[in-house]
Image (tube, coloured by chain):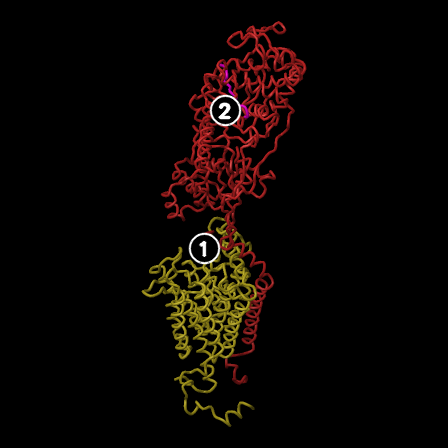
Chain colours: A yellow, B red
């Protein structure tokens, strides 16, 4: 075999005398994953720089500088996390879960309100949004609970327990109110359960219940006068089915985003972009950054970004299969689902096929907490990959 | 890279592998959806969305063009423009919510010193003319208001301040009736071919020469395409294509400001309702034309108060807007006599030497017609009959022609009771009573008797049913003076561009020629000259000492139950007149009392300019 021959003929040099690369652990990391993540972050910072030059008078670099700082912090965090054995998080699951719920809950007490919802803590240099980091924390904790409880109770009890564990933080986030993030929590919960082996029949029941819930929330509750969703949330969720030209309408944003993406054509409009430059598309630096990319860089740029996401998620799914233990499989599955859900919902929203839910585009949307949390999640993926590689070699980390 | 065989971790089993495979399949499907949608939007429909985006970001603004100036024949500016700040509201951009809308409008009403109902009415009226067009709430808004609105732009969505051009009248009321006014084009007018290409809100001439010569004065509105953001605000350096407005061309009138001013002053000095006209007898160029009472044309450039509206439109007796010089309907009194004379002479009912005995009264068909003042003039021929204004002489002529139609034929030929072709809207046709006319009325039961000799006797002296105005009389007198040419009276002289180059000249040719024996013309002019400047003449008191020889005729029209109307028609200089002046004043009494002095003032103004000019010329030559 090729492998055997190689090993015998020329022993790997770092086996004897570890070089700089091995000391840094680079050979054990997933280079493609790192490239995808770093590429997306870089592309995001670049796009922000182009698109927000004139947003803050006198400070063309306002958004870019902040985003770049978080990107660097995030990349550093990713590297550090990659060097830690993720398996320790399994033991810390209760602490992580408590921290998650407490963090999300504390926002109600200390958080500052932005546009009617309390989502973040105001810290001296930046504002921190616990629910963003919470996505990763939920994956780590929930995967731990699933592994831990695998032999306790009946299958049905377990399913209900997992659902409740996922529902609690999701409900807290929903009440902030942050509909989009609570949906991500839900997707994570379901994904971890799915990879964790919850029965197909249970998923069928959950699916039916979800359909009923959506019908109840969107149709029945408003009809009987006790709406669950805020009016703007409801409008956003339903408006993608009827785009509108009225700026006061929720469908307007969607329509404008679609026009922005479409007007980019094959190669984009560059600085001649108007939709995303002249405020036709709102929130262009956060939720609608994909529309900016679509308009400025056209199909070429947008497809490139989508390809990077596809690469990212392919590598994540691959890591699911590589993991040295079940915990790693579940964590990687949860992170892959988290990324996939956010990318699809956000890009779909920009392309007019998904409702507006306020979900940021991972690694691209402006927002320190989101970039940091996503890069840390990629760091956990790297850690799983690294542990798998090291375990295959029968060697362990330093 | 890595060895495949090692990659399956210890936890992988078939069930998990299936789940991961399904997961991967779902991911693949979702990405396929995104890629397909992206392809659909950008590659397949890119052009369509690009067009939508372009449409999104540009707004067209019409930039109104300044109208051309109106000048008098010597280049003095009578009408120019000034810029004014107009407060406009775009109804489409007002808040949709009724309460917010109400609040904003209420605030605007307060700021413009108006009331909410009045503001709503203004908007409603303008919107019914041009839906969705910006509504001008107020013109000439003060700077303080502009600044206030700019500072509080977000509180007043849909409100903007536009620079508009507004007519400026440096000489006040001068030539008000000739100029007319400017106003927004109406819905009906937009359908007319002459207003093709205009848009609601554009301004056009609505009366006077502003109307007649609108196509020269109007200019062409420019279009500025401006890039705007989502809120409709123009972006920095956002001007895309602009078509600059083309200013209107200047209109030069045949009016002589000095003469016009003198005429208006003379009318105002007496304070009697009436009109005047001074015209070149050969070309038909009108040097002065006016009506009293007059008005400030600038009232139309500002919103009118109810008092102003009442004054302009509701007072039927004063009716300041009506131009009595061209739309009046009056009998003329004795100023009609030259027309009777030419008719009688040309039809063979009179010779220049025939003498008629004037005993002070004449019985025709059982009715007794008396001279004015019941004076007996003795034996009079045509010349002396005109000099002393013998009514009996002309009664006789009227009687002779009572059923021949000669008087009507000649009066009609000279332009009485028919359109003059003047380039001003609103001119009246008038009425020339005739046998056919009255008999027709009688047949229809509109009158109690058929045509009689008495009717023609009345017409011969300019009384009775005759309805004409100073302009028609001036045209008729001009024809007698110039030997039979019926000129087309006009006030438009030429169109100049901004640099003063002549673009177009107006020379409306004569409407027709009437063959006239020069001897008859001379006899009539002599009679008129004697009437003005011979010792026994009817207007000798007025024109006896006038340095220029003139030929003028008084007229005293009876308009029961009103007091007599004063008329005066004068040709100057005698014997080869260049101009004709006609003046009438309602309730002015005898012709020499009111109208003649006004005519003299006008002639003085006319000849003052000419004489001093003629006096200067040799000096220049000598120097």
User: Does the stretch in magenta take in B589?
Assistant: no
The answer to whether one can see residue A251 in this image is no
The answer to whether one can see residue B210 in this image is yes
Q: Nearer the viewer, mark 2 or mark 1?
A: 2
Q: Splitting the image into 4 quarters, where does residue B110 fall?
A: top left
Disc number placed over residue B235 in the picture, else none? 1
Disc number placed over residue B227 in the picture, else none? none
Judging depth in this view, the residue of B594 and B449 nearest the camera is B594
Bounds of the magenta segment? B563-576
Q: Dot 2: within a 10 Å radius of its alpha carbon, few (fewer than 14), some, or many (20 or more) residues? A: many
Residue A232 percent across, percent down from the top left: 46, 53
Taking the image as shown, residue B96 lies to the left or right of residue B284, namely left
Judging depth in this view, the residue of A5 and A104 nearest the camera is A5
Judging depth in this view, the residue of A90 and B197 nearest the camera is B197
Q: Residue at x 55, y 54 (%)?
A: A242
- Residue that extends furthest to the front in the rendered view of this protein: B622
Residue B332 percent across, percent down from the top left: 55, 18
Residue B237 percent across, percent down from the top left: 45, 56
Residue B187 percent across, percent down from the top left: 56, 37
Q: In which chain is the residue bearing label 2?
A: B
- Residue that extends furthest to the bottom in the rendered view of this protein: A9
Number of marks present in the image shown: 2
User: Does the stretch in magenta take in B570?
Assistant: yes
The residue pinned by badge 2 equals B275
Quadrant including the C terminus of chain A: bottom left
């Amino acid at each position: 075999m090729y492998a055997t021959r190689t090993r015998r003929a020329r022993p790997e040099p770092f086996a004897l005398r570890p070089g700089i690369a091995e000391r840094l652990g680079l050979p054990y990391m997933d280079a493609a994953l790192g490239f995808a993540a770093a590429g997306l972050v870089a592309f995001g910072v670049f796009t922000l720089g182009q698109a927000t030059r004139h947003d803050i008078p006198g400070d063309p670099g306002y958004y870019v500088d902040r985003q770049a700082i978080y990107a660097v912090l995030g990349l550093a965090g990713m590297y550090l996390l990659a060097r830690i054995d993720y398996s320790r998080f399994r033991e810390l699951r209760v602490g992580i879960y408590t921290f998650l719920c407490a963090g999300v809950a504390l926002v109600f007490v200390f958080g500052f309100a932005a546009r009617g919802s309390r989502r973040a803590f105001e810290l001296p240099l930046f504002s921190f949004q616990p629910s963003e980091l919470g996505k990763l924390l939920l994956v780590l904790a929930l995967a731990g609970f699933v592994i831990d409880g695998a032999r306790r109770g009946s299958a049905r009890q377990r399913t209900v327990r997992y659902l409740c564990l996922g529902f609690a933080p999701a409900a807290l986030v929903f009440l902030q109110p942050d509909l989009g993030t609570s949906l991500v929590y839900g997707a994570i919960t379901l994904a971890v359960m799915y990879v964790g082996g919850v029965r197909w029949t249970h998923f069928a029941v959950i699916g039916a219940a979800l359909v009923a819930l959506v019908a109840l929330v969107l149709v029945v509750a408003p009809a009987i006068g006790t709406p669950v969703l805020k009016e703007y949330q409801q409008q956003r969720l339903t408006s993608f089915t009827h785009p509108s030209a009225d700026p006061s309408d929720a469908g307007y944003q969607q329509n404008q985003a679609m026009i922005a993406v479409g007007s980019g054509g094959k190669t984009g409009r560059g600085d001649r972009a108007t939709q995303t430059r002249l405020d036709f598309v709102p929130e262009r630096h956060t939720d609608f950054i994909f529309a900016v990319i679509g308009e400025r860089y056209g199909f070429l740029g947008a497809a490139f970004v989508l390809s990077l996401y596809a690469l990212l998620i392919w590598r994540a799914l691959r890591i699911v299969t590589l993991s040295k233990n079940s915990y790693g499989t579940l964590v990687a599955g949860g992170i892959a689902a988290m990324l996939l859900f956010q990318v699809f919902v956000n890009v779909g929203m920009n392309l007019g096929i998904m409702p507006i839910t306020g979900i940021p585009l991972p690694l691209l949307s402006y927002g320190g907490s989101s970039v940091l949390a996503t890069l840390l999640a990629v760091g956990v993926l790297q850690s799983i990959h690294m542990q798998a590689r090291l375990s295959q070699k029968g060697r362990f980390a330093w | 890279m890595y060895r495949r065989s090692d990659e399956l971790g210890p936890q992988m089993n078939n069930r998990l592998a299936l789940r991961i495979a399904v997961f991967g399949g779902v991911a693949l499907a979702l990405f396929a959806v995104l890629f397909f949608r992206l392809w659909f939007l950008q590659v397949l429909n890119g052009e369509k969305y690009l067009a939508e985006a372009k449409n999104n970001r540009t707004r067209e603004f019409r930039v109104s063009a300044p109208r051309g100036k109106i000048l008098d024949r010597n280049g003095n500016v009578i009408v120019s423009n000034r810029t004014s700040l107009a407060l406009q509201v775009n109804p489409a951009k007002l808040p949709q919510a009724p309460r917010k809308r109400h609040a904003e409008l209420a605030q605007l009403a307060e700021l413009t010193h108006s009331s909410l109902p009045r503001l709503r009415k203004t908007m409603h009226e303008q919107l019914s003319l041009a839906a969705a067009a910006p509504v001008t709430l107020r013109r000439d808004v003060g700077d303080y208001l502009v600044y206030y609105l700019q500072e509080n732009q977000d509180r007043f969505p849909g409100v903007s301040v536009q620079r508009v051009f507004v007519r400026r009248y440096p000489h006040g009321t001068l030539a008000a009736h000739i100029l007319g006014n400017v106003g927004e084009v109406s819905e009906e007018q937009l359908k007319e071919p002459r207003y093709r290409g205009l848009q609601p809100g554009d301004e056009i001439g609505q009366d006077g020469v502003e109307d007649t010569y609108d196509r020269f004065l109007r200019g062409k509105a420019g279009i500025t395409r401006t890039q705007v953001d989502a809120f409709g605000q123009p972006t920095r350096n956002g001007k895309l294509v602009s078509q600059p407005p083309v200013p209107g061309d200047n209109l030069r009138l045949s009016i002589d400001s000095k003469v016009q001013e003198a005429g208006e002053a003379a009318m105002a000095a007496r304070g009697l309702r009436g009109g005047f006209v001074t015209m070149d007898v050969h070309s038909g160029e009108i040097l002065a034309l006016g009506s009293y009472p007059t008005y400030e044309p600038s009232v139309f450039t500002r919103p009118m108060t109810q008092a102003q509206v009442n004054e302009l439109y509701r007072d039927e007796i004063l009716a300041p807007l009506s131009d009595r010089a061209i739309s009046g309907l009056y009998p003329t009194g004795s100023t009609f006599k030259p027309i009777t004379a030419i008719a009688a002479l040309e039809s063979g009912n009179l010779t220049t030497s025939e003498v008629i005995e004037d005993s002070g009264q004449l019985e025709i068909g059982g009715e007794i017609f008396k001279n004015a003042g019941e004076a007996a003039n003795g034996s009079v021929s045509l010349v002396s009959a005109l000099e002393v204004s013998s009514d009996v002489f002309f009664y006789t002529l009227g009687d002779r022609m009572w059923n021949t139609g000669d008087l009507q034929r000649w009066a009609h030929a000279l332009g009485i009771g028919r359109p003059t072709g003047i380039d001003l809207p609103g001119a009246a046709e008038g009425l020339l009573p005739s046998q056919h006319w009255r008999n027709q009325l009688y047949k229809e039961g509109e009158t109690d008797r058929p045509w009689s000799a008495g009717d023609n006797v009345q017409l011969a002296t300019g009384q009775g049913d005759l309805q004409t105005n100073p302009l028609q009389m001036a045209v008729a007198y001009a024809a007698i003076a110039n030997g039979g040419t019926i000129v087309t009276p006009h006030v438009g002289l030429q169109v100049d561009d901004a640099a003063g180059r002549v673009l177009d000249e107006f020379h409306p040719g004569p409407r027709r020629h009437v063959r006239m024996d020069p001897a008859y013309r001379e006899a009539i002019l002599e009679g008129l000259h004697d009437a003005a400047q011979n010792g026994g003449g009817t207007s000798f008191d007025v024109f006896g000492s006038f340095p220029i020889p003139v030929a003028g005729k008084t007229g005293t029209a009876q308009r029961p139950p009103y007091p007599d109307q004063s008329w005066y028609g004068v040709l100057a200089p005698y014997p080869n007149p260049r101009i004709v002046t006609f003046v009438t004043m309602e309730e002015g009494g005898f012709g020499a009392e009111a109208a003649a002095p006004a005519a003299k003032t006008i002639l003085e103004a006319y000849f003052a300019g000419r004489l001093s000019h003629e006096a200067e010329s040799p000096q220049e030559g000598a120097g």
